[in-house]
Amino acid sequence: MQSIEWRSSNVRRDFKAALFDFDGTISLIREGWQPIMYSYFTKVLSEVSPNEPIASLETLVREFVDDLTGKQTIYQCIRLAEEVERRGVKPEDPFVYKDEYNRRLLRHISHRVQALQSGEADPEEYLVPGSVELLKDLRQRGLTLYLASGTDHEYVLEEAAALGVGEYFNGGIYGAVRDFKSFSKEQVIRDLVLPKIESGEALLGFGDGFVEIENVKAVGGIAVGVASNEKDRQGIDPWKRDRLIKAGADVIIGDYRSREALLRELF
């Protein structure tokens, strides 16, 4: 039985809507993205600052990538451009860095999406365990489900469809767009979710990153921190757990195997 770590009391509510992050919260298709971004960004900085110790650059990159996880990828690329400029070199447009990162990542994960689309892979291999059952349960309870991701909108749609979960998000699926200032998880909550529920207290959030937990708590909702171990598909990721607690998560879980016990306390 997967453990549930309650960080708050008085979490029982009459929830009307649930907001989900995607990567690491529902989908494991992009498992391994961090090392790809760390490696690429470190390479960029080492080329413009060859005398700077690689270990120092790796630490710097890891810190700002981790801090911005949950926001759109472009924000990490903007920060990379700023670090290049600090070293006296004119940076590329952040979208150039983003496009190259996406190229490297897609090379790493494209076979997973293709295997899912062809039926060669079972979606369960690339889902946080218990995801489909949780989504079904929440829909049966009458909640409107929203998905908001920092990954590009087109990829979120494609990957949600490949996993067979897109149909559950009757409130819509929202991903990053080129005009990045016109989209954020906070905007999805403010402009799409809140107008349709009595108050933020009727919002239930699920996420494995700092941003979505903070956004849900900011409007008075209850936030479930999903400290998923993406590689092993079981247990708690200690790094995620610490960040989720700092963000204000009301409860910490590793996956949805104990969803029945979780929902009994929440509803």
Image (spheres, helix red, strand yellow):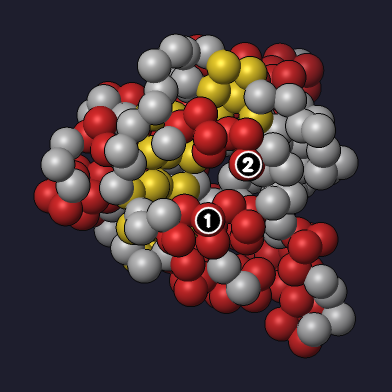
Tell me if 154 is positioned left or right of 27 in this view.
Answer: left
Viewer-proximal residue, 87 or 186? Answer: 186
Categorize mark 1 by other alpha carbons within 10 Å: few (<14), some (14-19), many (20+).
some
Comes first in the chain, label 2 or label 1: 1
Three-letter amino acid code of the residue under disc 1: Asp
Between residue 203 and residue 210, name the one nearer to us.
203
| Figure quadrant of the C terminus | top left
Secondary element type, mark 2: helix
Give coordinates of residue 107: x percent, y percent: 75, 66
**Residue on which the image places disc 1:** 137
Image quadrant holding the N terminus, namely top right
Give the tally of numbered discs.
2
Q: Residue at x 77, y 22 (%)?
A: 54
Which residue was labeled with disc 2? 259
Residue 224 percent coordinates (x, y): 51, 31
Q: Is residue 4 above or below residue 92?
A: above
Quick check: can you spot residue 123?
Answer: yes
Taking depth in this image into account, of 158 and 218 the one nearest to the observer is 218
Q: Are marks 2 and 1 in contact (CB under 8 Å)?
A: yes
SS under mark 1: helix
Amino acid type at circle 2 is Arg
